[in-house]
Image: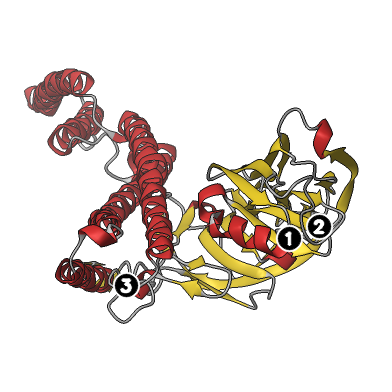
Amino acid sequence: MSRINNNINSLIAQRVTGQQNAALSKSLERLSTGLRINRGGDDPAGLIASEVLRGEKAALTSAIGNAERAEQFVATAEGGLQEINALLTEVQSLVGQSANEAGLSQEEKEANQLQIDNILTTIDRIASTTSFQGTKLLNGNFDFQVSSVAATVDSLNINDAKLGSDNVAVQALVTQSAQNAGVFLSLGDTSLDLTSAVSSFVFELGGAEGTREFSFGSGATLADMATQINTFKDVTGVSAVASGDYLELKSTEFGEDAFVSFNITNDGGQTGGVVNLCAVDTDLLGPTATNFTAITAAIRDEGQDLAGTINGIAARGDGKTLSVSSDALAAEVTLTTAGAQATGSTAVATIYGGGAEFNLGAEVNLNNQVRLGIGSVAARELGQYNDGTKDYFLDDLGSSGDLNVVDGDLTDAQKVIDQALREVSGQRGRLGAFQKNVVGSTINSLSVAFENISAAESAIRDTDFAEATAELARNQVLVAAANQVLGIANSQTSQALTLL
């Protein structure tokens, strides 16, 4: 080394020392932060990928929180319905007890009515006070809002609907009408004409509710027979109408579960026979007739369920009701008798809002949004039943209602309670299914996705401590060596003094 102005060896050693110190600093930074990527310069592509994954993790965390909050919301609503279910069961017991009229005193009936009044008040209180974060759940706040309901619609229940920026039109297409079961008795006259005054015209009549035997003497008019049969229509599920020289026997309900069974026990010499109803229209006579003398086994006719579609989706028919359950729409439409017996398209209603909306996915879009309809369970809304002349509800069992247990119609009262129990238990079942199959499954799915994305993000961004500690030890040795070499390089210039 004969030159001193530029010590090349020292410059090289300085550069290497700086590099080794930078590598050591990076190793220390990775070990102290636990991150392999602390800035964009560490790994630009890795930084982009990890930040995208971090965003997805944040969205999944929010989605899991939303689903858990939805589960708590539904559990609160279901808790209120559970108590109402228990109260309705108690009302059912009180009505059944009050029907034992001769065995109960007036005071006992009035005491039962007082209990029912208190229960109805409690049901209304639960419906109006069950809330989640100050929002009422069972008073109809979360029922779907509909408009333009068709006159042929008797009732409409919307359980779920995808509502975007536009309203949803509910369109039903009836391809098969609903029909009663029934037969016609053709007697050839307006009254019975038996072979003798002591003869009897005896037949067994059955329906969905039960079976009963009827016996009529000579001279009994068709009107008399119809009156007697209608007296027991709640027992048999079959009603009668006298028309000319025909006695029309029809099931009180529509659908395949309804039937009319007729069998002769003793024709008493009466001429005539049984005529089946038309398969597609029970207001018309069918082509088949059987004489009374030829009846060896019960003649049976069954009703017919509605068939059709709702918004193009194949619907399930049950009597006069069409129901559909899909991701886009879950609805139940019950038509009036006139509407159910006519085929064709019907604009049922338009859904323009409502429902409890939850976003159960990582992305905020229509696909991840779920709306759950929760109807009002106030006493004035529950248990709708029509006896042919009037609609009754649960609040009609109150002291001032027509179905009170002191002097009201207990048969209709029990039917109202049965319907109310079906409605409340059905709503509990829907909430339970939502809680288990929608919310529960969503939480499980999102949790698995969160785990996998966290693993991917960790593989890209987190420090591998085994590798980093080895790198630290290597860098420490290299820094020490570089410092030693730099010292040697700096001392080499002093050798030039020996030449002076």
- Which residue is disc 3 drawn over? 404
**Tag 2: amino acid:** Tyr
- Which residue is disc 2 drawn over? 246
Please determine whether, in this image, residue 40 is positioned above or below residue 456: below
Q: Residues within 10 Å of mark 1 (few under 14, many from 20)?
A: many
Task: Kindly state the secondary structure of the residue where label 3 is placed.
Answer: loop
Residue situated in front as seen by the camera: 296 or 278 = 296
Task: Kindly state the secondary structure of the residue where label 2 is placed.
Answer: strand
Question: Circles 1 and 2: CB distance less than 8 Å?
Answer: yes
Where is residue 480 shown, x and y percent of the image? 10, 22
Mark 3 or 2, nearer chain start? 2
Residue situated in front as seen by the camera: 340 or 164 = 340
Mark whose residue sits in front, 1 or 2: 1
Please determine whether, in this image, residue 407 is positioned above or below residue 250: below
Mark whose residue sits in front, 3 or 2: 2
Mark 1 or 2, nearer chain start? 1
Q: Seen from this angle, which residue lies furthest bottom? A: 400
**Residue 394 in view in this figure:** yes
- Which residue is disc 1 drawn over? 222
Q: Quadrant of residue 290?
A: top right
Count of labels in the image: 3
Q: Quadrant of residue 417?
A: bottom left
Q: Quadrant of residue 457?
A: top left
